[in-house]
Every structure is written in C-alpha cells, then in structure tokens.
Amino acid sequence: MIDPSLSGATSGAYHSVQVSVDVRLNVNESPLAPPGGFSERLGERLATLSLNRYPDRGAREVRAAIARREGRLPEEVFVANGSNEVLQTLFLAYGGPDRKVYLAQPTYGMYSQIAKTTRTAVVEGRRRENWRLDRGDIIEAGAEVVVICDPNNPTGLEELDGLSSIAAERPGSLFVVDRAYGDFAEGLEPWRGPNVVEVKTFSKAFGMAGLRLGYAIAEPEVVEVLYSVVLPYHLDSLKQQAALVALEMEAELSSVVGEVKRERDLLMDELDSLPVSYWRSSANFVLFSPRNRQARAVWSALVERSILVRDSSTWPGLDNTLRVTVGTPEENALFIKALREVLAG
C-alpha cells in the first residue's frame, strides 16, 4: 500500500473526544437549538428545490444576504462549508510550499493542521506575558500569511487596540482575522484593508454548528481568487436555503448571545470560589487550570459524573488547563457542582 505523501498526515489531527454524557460542554456549541419556526420555514424552502440540478455555484443569494448584514458588497463575500473550509481555501490560495504562516500559540489548533496539510511552513510567533500578540514579533516574522484569532481560542482573550495598523505596514502579507467568537465580545478593533480577510461562522452566535457554514469578508480580488481555488458547487442547495432562512431569522437565532454572556460571567463568578485559575473570557467558553490537581484527572472525574469539557492540557502553552463551553443555566450548575466535588476530593 502506498504511503501518504504528507508526512504525519494521520497523526496530531485536531479532534475532540466524543463520549456519551448528559452534559456536553467541550466544543463551544450554542446551548440552545434554533427555534421551531426555523425548521418550519426551512422545510417550506426545501420542498421547492430541484435536487436533480446543481446548486448555484456562486451562492449569489447567500452572498447578497451576508453582504447586507455586513454592510459590504456581494463580491466581497466568500461562503464555504464552515469557517474551516474558508481557512483551508485561504491557505491553498495564499500559503503552500515556499510560503510561511505566522501563528502564535496558544491558538486554534486547526490553523496548524491546515498549514500542515497545505504544506505551508509555520513561523512560531510569541505572545506577551498577558497572552496577547506581540506587534513587533509579527512585523519581524515576515510571513506571507498572518492568522489572528480575536477573541482568541482557547484563551477567550481579546487582542489589544492598535494591532490592526500592522496590515498597512505589511502590504505584502495577508492578514486573516478569525472572528468566530466576535459576537460575544465588546468593542473589538475593526480591521480593514486590501490585504485583510475577516473570517466568520454561523456555528457560534447563530447556534447553527450543524449547518457547517462560514464566510470570509475581503476585497473582491481576494474573493475572486478564493472562488478560483475552491471546488465547484461546493455549497449544496440545502445549505444555501438554510443559510438564507438563518439570515432572515437572525434576531431570533442570535438572541441567545446575551444569555450566553450573562451565563459566562456567572460561571466565572463561581470559579472565583474554587481552587482554580482562569482567564477572563470574551467568548462563549472559559479556560481554567486546577491549582492542586492534574487537569487530566479532573477531566476524567468530570466524565465519570457525565460531564464533558475539553482537555486542553496537551496543547502548546496550555499545561494543566481545561476549557469549558458556556451551557444552559442548568448545565452550568451541574458542571460547577461536579467540579466542586472533584476538586474537594
């Protein structure tokens, strides 16, 4: 059997352990399903589709609807199967052999995985003591692609003001700003420029993780390149209709954001009373570290109590940490109760 041409293709992939539990707080999903009206409206749309025909290759209606939401033009919107496909297409178009991408750990693990699978060399950046990005380090790195997750996953921290001006100083680099958790933050610094791409997703604030839809906002020249790289008809007809319904019902779908932010703050208040350290989050999750226990042991003990969080203790720069997604009030209460028991044992 021939070996894969990509060394280590089957090792180190970014996946979350899936086990059967009552409370699942490990992959930063929305705690609430879309309202019933969504399914009804979507069902009516799906009944009109001719599935023997290919979907609109350019997803023109979806791009126009997203453009209205973002205050941009349809030709400045690229849509794909989740923000991960957006990122992969960006790396295929602007990364690859003889190109470098700047990544500062800790950050979202898929960046490194996509860099590996697209044969893009990684420039390992450094973060300051407060875990924010180092402006000078980005400039000195000279990478063709710079990826900035803001708020950052898995720390939940926002980047500090003044970072966006780097794009104008580095016109030969493409700045990819991942805003997957931007709706849960307050007053994020805006990024704009011919070499800036903002990446967003329907998985978090919209509560549509099962839809697998993401998009990029960029200059038309960049969007045109992305559509020349992505596979034809990559966004199926069902998904396009679901996206349109979601955008029509944005107010109902995204109303959960306020509740998540309130629950997040209450969750951190509860963590104040426990023997853990944590980082003040601007996302829909909280990263924390047990002070007197090993994170992996705490993770296992929580699973025994039918609660699943993310074991982040093996990720770069995150020794002895766990990440918990903000759930419903009931789920959060069960998590805190179980964590209190585990840490007291």
Image (cartoon, rainbow, N blue to C red):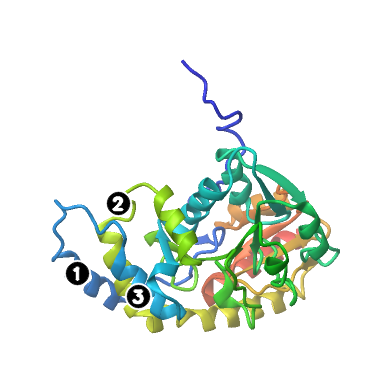
Q: How many marks?
A: 3
Residue 3 lies left or right of residue 59; in this view the side is: right
Residue 23 lies left or right of residue 55; in this view the side is: right
The quadrant of the picture occupied by the C terminus is: bottom right
Distance in Å between CA atoms under marks 3 and 2: 19 Å
N-terminal of the two: label 3 or label 2? 3
Q: Is residue 262 above or below residue 113?
A: below
Q: Amino acid at mark 3?
A: Ala
Horizontal and vertical percent position of residue 154:
66, 60
Horizontal and vertical percent position of residue 293:
79, 54
Q: Is residue 74 visible?
A: yes
Point out which mark residue 311 bears: none
Q: Secondary structure at mark 3?
A: helix
* Residue, far top: 1
Residue 243 lies left or right of residue 261; in this view the side is: left
Horizontal and vertical percent position of residue 28:
55, 63
Q: Is residue 196 above or below residue 227?
A: below
Q: Which residue is mark 2?
A: 233
Q: Which residue is mark 3?
A: 65
Q: Amino acid at mark 2?
A: Tyr
Q: Which residue is mark 1?
A: 45
N-terminal of the two: label 1 or label 2? 1
Distance in Å between CA atoms under marks 3 and 1: 16 Å
Front residue of this view, candidates 321 and 109? 109
